[in-house]
Image: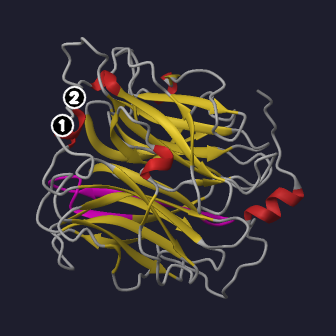
Amino acid sequence: MTRVSRISVAAALLLGAFTVEPRAWAATCESSVPYVSGEGGYAQYRIPAVVRTWRGTLLAFAEGRHATAGDSGDIDVVLRRSSDGGCTWSPLQVVADGKGDTRGNPAPVVDPRTGDIVLVTSYNDGSVSEAQIMRGQVTKAQSRRVFVQRSHSDGRSFTAPQEITAQVKPPGWRWYATGPGHAVALTEGPHRGRLVVAADHSAAPRAGSTDSGSEAKYYGGHALYSDDHGRTWHLGFVDDSYTGHDNANETTAAQLPGGCLYFNARDQNGSSPGNRLDAWSSDGGETLDAVYTVQSTLDEVPVVEGSVLQLRGADAPLLFSAPSVPTARRSMALWSSTDQGVTFDRLRTLTDRKAAYSDLVQVDKNTVGVLYETGMRTAYETIEFRRLPAP
């Protein structure tokens, strides 16, 4: 795998290197709270995802859970927009209405050729649980399915969800989860323009096994990708060892300088020491250069979703966000890698409060944003947006 330390000028321009700001605003706030559980008709907001559009608008997605704190039930994908760098937010809008069922795991990405926002999400019948799905106790219609939507209007409106399950979910898979968190648009190399969504799944036990399928060892990571602006989709690499040593679950990805993809995954109760796994792909997510292995320099992270973001600019670092107490979801922190994900160093702790899922975005050339779950009594009381100086 070839590692490159600098981004070309052309690629930097394609990425939107913030040489000219789209608005004459200068945000001075440090943080804001776009989502407060119990407000806006939802009992709880969870699973944040955030992207910056071509116009400089921040789009903060989340799951709006109507009456339950669980992962199934009547759940919508909701959105709030910010035109001032995350200091203030527009009224809440529903992007994908569950209508009694579960729509979630938002994985948004900005198409690098059109500027459209492409949103991939997951679905299941609201009456069934993840455990039931993993045990194969549901019908095909009730099980996990995959959908895509598009916005041509800077996130003001989205098309209706269009199902792509048959394109990206093989027979024999049970669970399926997109992201969650922002997806990746490739801007360098032979697959320039490709949209890549990091995801995970579970497989059915082999014939004759006494396992139910709900065991953590049946989780695996994979990627789905589109080469035509999100109209059709393909299954990329599949992590299918199912050994119980390293069980890739919720996954985040970043394009490194030179075009290589970096994947960082939650290890779901694997027997190897450590709770983070990572891998690289040199062919746009179609295959992995090597299998997922434990990322030992992120050993402070508990079993939880995390986010990675490659900052734009020559010699810019790769960032990672997650809670920083190995045995608890608390103390959201930021790590930095200057060797393209081989090792990470802790940069700072954002809070000592309880904290869980997060997503990262580059707000402008000087500012990084972290959209993360946090609270005093539980980690799911609010979703906060924190602005930080770019390292």
Q: Where is residue 271 in the image (x, y as percent from the top left)?
A: 33, 14
The span picked out in magenta is 363-384
What is the residue that sits farthest to the right in this orientation? 9
Residue 334 appearing in the image? no
Circle 1 sits on which residue? 131
- In which quarter of the view is residue 204 placed? top left
Direction from residue 124 to residue 110 in the image, left or right: right
The residue at the point 20 percent across, 17 percent down is 211
Quarter of the N terminus within the rendering = top right
Q: Which of marks 2 and 1 is nearer the N terminus?
A: 1
Residue 344: mark in rendering: none
Circle 2 sits on which residue? 214
The answer for how far apart the CA atoms under marks 2 and 1 are is 6 Å
Q: What residue type is labelled 1?
A: Ala
Q: How many numbered tags mark residues here?
A: 2
Q: Which amino acid does label 2 sit on?
A: Ser
Q: Is residue 331 above or below residue 57?
A: above
The structure's colour scheme is secondary structure
Taking the magenta stretch, the answer to whether it contains residue 183 is no
Taking the magenta stretch, the answer to whether it contains residue 373 is yes
Q: Is residue 174 above or below residue 354?
A: above
- Badge 2 vs badge 1, beta-carbon distance below 8 Å: yes
Q: Determine the main secondary structure of the stretch shown in magenta.
A: strand
